[in-house]
Amino acid sequence: MIRTPAFRFAGYYGAFYLLLGCFLPYFPQWLDGQGLSPEWIGWIVAAGMAGRTLVSPIGARWSDTAIRRRDPILAFAIGCVVVFGLHGASSLPWVLLVLSFLSGALVFGQIPVIDAFAIRSARGGAFSFGPVRAFGSAMFIVANFTAGFLIDRLGTQSILAWLILAAGLLALAAAWLPEGRREEAQAPGKGDIGRLLVMLAGPLGLALLASAMVQAGHGFYYAFSAKAWSEQGFSGTAIGALWASGVVVEIAFLWLSGKGLLGRASPAVLLGVGAIGSVVRWGLTALSPPLWALFILQSLHALTFAATYVGFLRFAADNVPDEHAALAQALNSALSGGLVMAAASAASGYFYAQLGAGGFAIMIIPALCGLVAAVFLYRQQALPGPEKID
């Protein structure tokens, strides 16, 4: 049973989110420990998002055409071990900028490929994707608490040690994934790409825009929440608990996403709900509320991240053919976690320097743009006519 695809994918997601659960909240804190200014931290974090933008589509196209879908995931995981190992070699800002570009590309480049691979493998009732993915989120919580505890006891250098060890575990988990073997490699057809481009001018473009804008609203959160809350007087353990509390509700949402009302919600509705949650969450977090109120606001992560994530996954599954599944996910990753997120992260450094935690409020702007795109997507999909590329 432990060798079934469900266990193998769960093992990979668990290892990946053990890495990400430290990387997302605490990597900027490691940069701060290297003596870098908020402006430099913003640019270095943005470089990682830019790497995600440029490399994700390459890995996705490789996955869509490779004989073994596992190959790009394994290559990226091994690359993570090497790049994180190099981070300790220099504290020069320009060196860290280049390494951040590479680490962002290698870490985040795996997400669209593994999501498309897992969803494809789960079809036909082979296993349920939601609980498998939720296991990864549970490991994110483990990383939040454990890494936060280690930072309190050992300082920020423990962050890099965690990342190197977690990357090694991720490489082993990637090697354990099913091969995902095709009978033969596929070459992209010009007609297929053309139809995908046509769809980008319609509903796919709107879904990508809505997802990108709502997810980019997390830019300030990812780059400066740990620093802002630390300066507010909260311990590393408390900060880890705040991040973990958001992931707890994310797990619940993912677990229930295929059932009842959530199972029937359209992609546009999920994206719109995520946008509304984002406006409320960042607007109130900017007021530097007390710890108990922050825990309540963190519950909105179920909407700002999970609903938005599931909304685009559901749209892609319903409207994009298998031969472009990973590419569609990569476009979403390149925009939502890459290009738009990079701009938000870079801007966050300047807003944090001027406003401190008040800079959270700036993230309302992309959230409102995402809401507009979700409304247009809802109206367009409500109209009769073909939507899926056949």
Image: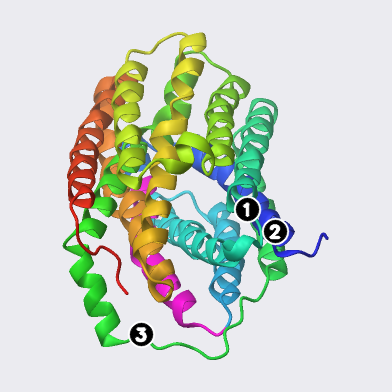
Query: Where is residue 28 drawn, in percent x and y?
Result: 46, 39
> Disc 1 marks which amino acid?
Ser
Q: In this picture, is 9 found above or below 353?
A: below
Q: Report the residue that reaches farthest toward the front.
A: 384
Reading the image, the residue beneath label 1 is 128
| Mark 1 residue crowding within 10 angstroms, few (<14) / some (14–19) / many (20+) | some
Quadrant including the C terminus:
bottom left
Quadrant hosting residue 199:
bottom left
Horizontal side of residue 296 vs 333, given as left or right: right
Q: Nearer the viewer, mark 2 or mark 1?
A: 1
What's the distance in space between the residues labelled 1 and 3, CA to CA?
29 Å
Reading the image, the residue beneath label 2 is 6
> Disc 3 marks which amino acid?
Pro
Quadrant including the N terminus:
bottom right
Quadrant hosting residue 114:
bottom right
Q: Nearer the viewer, residue 96 or 320?
A: 320
